Image: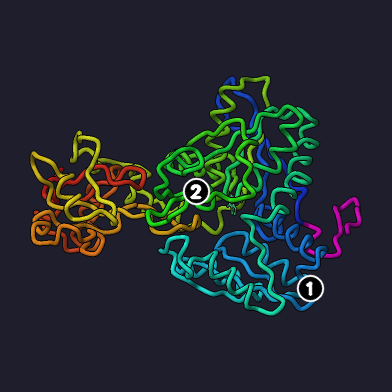
Amino acid sequence: MATQTSGGPVYDSVLDAVGATPLVRLGRIVPDGGAPVWVKTEGTNPGGSVKDRAAVAMVRAAEESGALRHGGTIVEGTSGNTGVGLAMVAAARGYRAVLVVPDRTTPEKIALLRAYGAEVVTTPGLVPKQDPRHVQQLAARIAAETPGGWLADQYGNPANPDVHEHTTGPEIWTQTGGRVTHLVAGAGTGGTVTGAGRYLSARGVQVVAADPWTSRYGGGDGSPYAVEAVGHYLHPLTETDTWPAVYDTAVPNRTERVDDGESLRTLRRLAREEGLLVGGSGGLAVAAALRVSAQAGPDGLVVAVLPDSGRIYLSRYFDDARLRTLGFLDAPQGPLVRDAVGPYEPGLRVAPATATVAEVRAGLGDGPLPDLVPVVQPRTTDATTWAVPDVVGCVRVAELAGLAADDRVGAHAGPPPVTVGHGEGLDEALTRLDADGVGSGDPVLVLVDGRAVTQVHRSDLRR
Ligand SMILES: Cc1ncc(COP(=O)(O)O)c(C=O)c1O
């Protein structure tokens, strides 16, 4: 319940402060002649993200149906914003919360969940979906075995998309006075784009799903990407690629696929040119929205959903030195690594960890052999993990001959090779390689936007 005053609303509970988020007109980064782009700032929700809406709605629905009772325990598998939302709701409503998170979850995120009083259970993030240790499998088991346990199940719970149909969509319609022509939103569970999209498309609005380039949703190969919490990974050992039941893929009229480099550069422009500090999925959505704006022209009105704030991603998306080593940013001054590397043939040969030694040998073909073959493997089925660079190890070509033909290369992979970003300052890169004891004949992988593109020797990196 809220009491309206001229100074703003007064709420009985923090949960009543969820939703009714501001729309902000982008001022400086919209293309000339394009449609205005307005952004829905979901990071202003009290738990910090769009997932507060789903968390409150799922708990209310469970209370109404009797699935969650006084003294009960809320259980969910998530390292992300849904966990924070559920931890907040549990605290405000007096429930116990048990959240299962992958072991690579940052200590800050675990601390955030615990700060709300939630119990955190960690489990390996590197396992296929059918494995009983998988985040979602383990959460389901804990919910079933805990007396009074209730699994929120954001991927299958209809209250998730419904809340967006009843709140996010109508808010956007009202805030734009019915003038919105395009909605752009990323899809994690798909709740936002399905629910808000349903409401708005019934009013003639075009719905555009923004998707990381390699995500399965938009037709990518399912390999990892840097933008967290949206899109759909495919672990190579996952037997059945199931998509969330709540994502109605018939709702979006189309998908805009955006690579990590464009998402990250847009996110950084949002912070520096618009004063909007948002997470990776906000950069993705705005990158797609800027394209939609250019296509729609001045008569359109594009609304993009910014799901959360950038504060919890400072060490990922806003650490310039780190982004340079990953090949996302250029050093302010040359010479750069790419000046020394020169042109390279596209199509660096890499081996999935699941490939056999015989397959890798056959894949090398004729011609000059590289020193090593980078081994790549999606690191997790969980969509909340920084997963670049995508190289997880390497096998030395000279050693392949001594290995059994049907062994998997993943079992023989050594540590990942040394990497440099193609836009990293050459001196900066060489200092780093020296500190790591890389010898002049040692192989070095060059990264562009977090992905290995070519292999050189340390001795090739000369001014
Ligand atoms: C930062 C962020 N962006 C986007 C999403 C995707 O929202 P949805 O699950 O409604 O598709 C999430 C979901 O957790 C999120 O945490």
Q: Give coordinates of residue 356: x percent, y percent.
A: 22, 55
> What residue is disc 2 on?
232
**Where are the magenta residues, as a range?**
1-17
Q: How many marks?
A: 2
Q: Is residue 110 above or below residue 267?
A: below
Q: Is residue 346 above or below residue 380?
A: above
Q: Give coordinates of residue 176: x percent, y percent.
A: 76, 33
Q: Residue at x 64, y 70 (%)?
A: 75
Q: Give coordinates of residue 6: x percent, y percent.
A: 90, 50
Residue 461 in sight here = no
Q: Is mark 1 within 8 Å of ligand 1?
A: no
* Disc 2 from disc 1: Cα separation: 33 Å
Query: Quick check: is 168 in the magenta stretch?
Result: no
Q: Is residue 397 above or below residue 143?
A: above
Q: Where is the C terminus found, in terms of image quarters? A: top left
Residue 69: assigned label: 1
